[in-house]
Amino acid sequence: MKKLYKQKQVNSLPIVSLVVIGIFVLNGLFGSLILPKDPTETDLVNKLLPPVFFGGTWNYPLGTDELGRDVLSRIIAGGRVSLIVAAAAIVVGGIVGTALGIIAGYYENLADTIITRLTDASLAFPSILLALLLSIGIGPGEKAAIIAIAFAMWAKYARTVRSEVLIIKTANYITQAKIMGAGDLRIITRHILPNIKDMIIVMVSLEVGMSIISEASLSFLGLSVVPPTPSWGQMIADGKNYFQNGWWVSVFPALITIITVLSFQRFGNWLKVSKGGKA
């Protein structure tokens, strides 16, 4: 009975996570329309004002940072940066990794050997370390962060897709399609891709959180967006030197990052179970 209850809990739709994800996406798309203040505008007269519930004012609900910038506005603007970087990195890394995984698994020739070796080499490094090294080489900025994070995640897609394709291509319907004269491109697009679609969706849902963490880590180290453009990791870094008298500068963006990442992980795990445990 207890086991069934736990299974039901795992399979239940994570409503809270979906609400958080929905807010995150809507903020990324339309957040610029609801900004209370300019997130880059400084006001040294009002620097390090506490949040409203800790003696501050409703004019700055979450307080201000060391330069008098509105923390709430910067969190909203930083969410857009996280969405853009995470989405773009997953699209680039996912497409490249999926394409290479299909090539390696379907043909099993010299290309498979090369791709497999490159995949193993990439997976030997922690993804955040690889993203860090690439960002140092490319330079700071959103484009650099996207390339670095995408390069750090493509191998996961390639390895997983290759393993799945090796199984699928031995199915009877693939053999029958070849007998009927179907070309490789038709088999890949009509038979293989539809069968790995669910697995890729699960991987994407799980990788969004890791992409947000990677972008925040790069921003914290000054290797992602260039100031004064706000990002959550950069806000955490900016507030670490003022923690005793301005804890809110770091705490609020850190909490938002944690809640968002956990929501994507919770949704990804639920999706994985609902899709049969693939990925």
Image: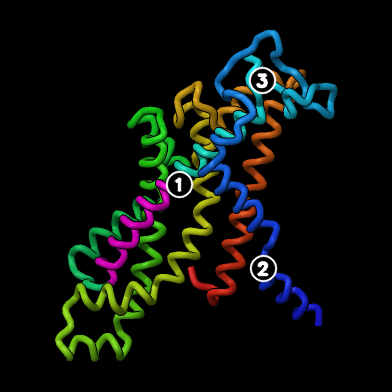
Report the front residue among 45 and 268: 45
Instruction: Give x and y (percent) for residue 35.
Output: 60, 31
Which of marks 2 and 3 precedes in the sequence? 2
Report the front residue among 138 and 253: 253
Task: Compute the Cα span from label 3 to label 2.
Answer: 38 Å
Task: Compute the Cα span from label 1 to label 2.
Answer: 30 Å
Magenta region, mostly helix, strand or loop? helix
| Amino acid type, mark 2 | Leu
- In-image side of 64 versus 174 (left or right): right
| Amino acid type, mark 3 | Asp
Which of marks 2 and 1 precedes in the sequence? 2
Mark 1 or 2: in front is 2
Circle number at residue 127: 1
Which of marks 1 and 3 precedes in the sequence? 3
In which quadrant of the rendered image does the N terminus lie? bottom right
Q: Label 2 belongs to which residue?
A: 13
